[in-house]
Image (spheres, helix red, strand yellow):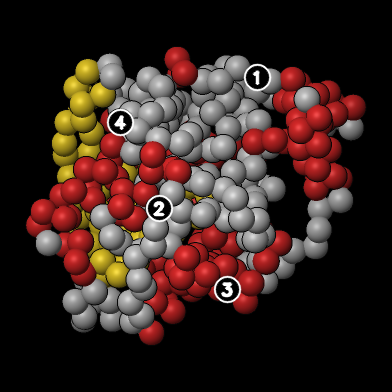
């Protein structure tokens, strides 16, 4: 209870006295605004677990949006063996060709948890609602899980980053990967999670593509107004260092705190295990004490164009630096997350 109260107090103070933060340059702020509009549209579809009608609708949005871009689009269909049976899934890979035989992958997941496994509202959230109401602020909670941040923000931002690559000339190949089945379909375990990224890592290993991937940057839950990116200890040390240096140079050090100790089980882990330098950009403090995660509170009103624009700025600057230097990062050791640790500790 003390930990919960501490998390709520810290979150409330951020809302009452937000620290002064630099706004992303106009180019990236506008990109963030477009991503926010798209994330809201995606959330309106409702919960999007594999096999649902809303999931099929989102697949159509992703496919039709990528088809408008000057890139090769690959639909990687597969059948996942899950605790609830065989489930058809599909990854979407947008490939922008460069001049050199090296590839950087920007990835994220587009599915959401099943509505049957949504977490109940905790007492911290109930206290947060009372606080909002006491300040005369509107408090609305959707009746179904929307996954605005967890699933919606990464999908929308990946689509906008893909669109922005039309105007960028890069020497390296750049692949934008939309992974299916990141969420557990029953209970999070080593075998019930990250279906799409595990399949893709294996597929690229079999066809030889994995050898040319010099870095993978995964984004997840990156739209929160009070964004704090977790310092994931299972990400590649050198690549994580590059991301944090770029964020600091761009003026976002407060959003990228250095707090060792987090182990994030996410879509970067299968690639770490396969020997690819990978880093996870994920917010593990979504709401007071992470209380909005996997609950009905994950709604569009929690999202910010500023946060989405900031992440786009950092990711595209990292992409530019990787392109200019052509640096080869050594592969790092992976710890607890690969052994089945929960995605958000």
Question: Residue 289 location in percent, x, y?
Answer: 70, 35
**Foreground mark, 2 or 1?**
2
Residue drawn at x 21%, y 81% as measured from the top left: 99
* Residue reaching furthest to the left: 207
Q: Is residue 213 above or below residue 43?
A: below
- Give the mark nearer the N terminus: 3 vs 1: 1
Residue drawn at x 72%, y 36% as measured from the top left: 288
Q: Which residue is mark 1?
A: 121
Question: Residue 54 location in percent, x, y?
Answer: 36, 27
Q: Which residue is mark 3?
A: 245
Q: Nearer the viewer, residue 80 or 176?
A: 80
Q: CA distance from mark 2 to mark 3?
A: 22 Å
**Foreground mark, 2 or 3?**
2
Circle 4 SS class: loop
**Foreground mark, 3 or 1?**
3
Q: CA distance from mark 2 to mark 1?
A: 33 Å
Q: CA distance from mark 4 to mark 1?
A: 27 Å
Note whether residue 195 is visible.
yes
Circle 2 SS class: loop
Other-residue count near label 1 (Cα within 10 Å), few / some / many at <14 / 14–19 / ≥20: some
Q: Does the residue at mark 2 contact the one at mark 4 (Cβ under 8 Å)?
A: no
The numbered mark at residue 191 is 4
Q: CA distance from mark 2 to mark 4?
A: 17 Å
Question: Residue 230 location in percent, x, y?
Answer: 58, 52
**Foreground mark, 4 or 1?**
4
Question: Residue 197 location in percent, x, y?
Answer: 29, 45
Circle 3 SS class: helix
Q: Does the residue at mark 2 contact the one at mark 3 (Cβ under 8 Å)?
A: no
Q: Which residue is mark 2?
A: 334
Note whether residue 156 is visible.
no
Q: CA distance from mark 3 to mark 4?
A: 34 Å
């Amino acid at each position: 209870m003390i930990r919960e109260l501490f998390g709520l107090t810290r979150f409330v103070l951020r809302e009452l006295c937000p620290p002064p933060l630099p706004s992303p340059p106009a180019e990236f702020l506008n990109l963030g605004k477009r991503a926010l509009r798209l994330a809201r549209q995606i959330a309106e579809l409702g919960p999007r677990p594999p096999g649902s009608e809303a999931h099929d609708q989102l697949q159509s949005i992703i496919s039709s949006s990528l088809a408008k871009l000057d890139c090769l689009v690959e639909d990687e269909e597969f059948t996942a063996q899950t605790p609830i049976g065989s489930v058809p899934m599909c990854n979407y890979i947008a490939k922008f060709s460069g001049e050199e035989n090296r590839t950087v992958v920007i990835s994220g997941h587009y599915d959401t948890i099943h509505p049957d496994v949504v977490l109940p509202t905790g007492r911290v959230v109930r206290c947060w609602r009372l606080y909002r109401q006491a300040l005369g602020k509107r408090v609305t909670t959707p009746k179904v899980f929307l996954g605005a941040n967890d699933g919606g923000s990464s999908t929308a931002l990946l689509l906008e980053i893909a669109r922005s690559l039309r105007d960028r000339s890069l020497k390296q190949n750049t692949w934008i990967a939309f992974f299916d089945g990141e969420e557990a379909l029953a209970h999070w375990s080593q075998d019930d999670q990250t279906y799409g990224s595990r399949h893709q890592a294996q597929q690229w290993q079999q066809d030889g593509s994995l050898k040319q991937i010099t870095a993978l940057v995964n984004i997840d839950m990156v739209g929160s107004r009070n964004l704090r990116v977790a310092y994931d200890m299972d990400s590649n040390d050198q690549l994580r260092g590059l991301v944090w240096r770029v964020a600091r140079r761009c003026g976002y050090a407060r959003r990228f705190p250095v707090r060792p100790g987090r182990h994030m089980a996410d879509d970067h882990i299968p690639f770490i295990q396969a020997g690819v330098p990978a880093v996870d950009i994920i917010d593990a403090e979504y709401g007071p004490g992470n209380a909005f995660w996997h609950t009905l509170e994950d709604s569009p009103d929690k999202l910010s164009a500023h946060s989405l624009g900031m992440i786009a700025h950092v990711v595209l600057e990292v992409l530019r630096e990787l392109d200019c230097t052509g640096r080869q990062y050594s592969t790092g050791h992976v710890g607890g997350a690969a052994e089945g640790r929960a995605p958000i500790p």
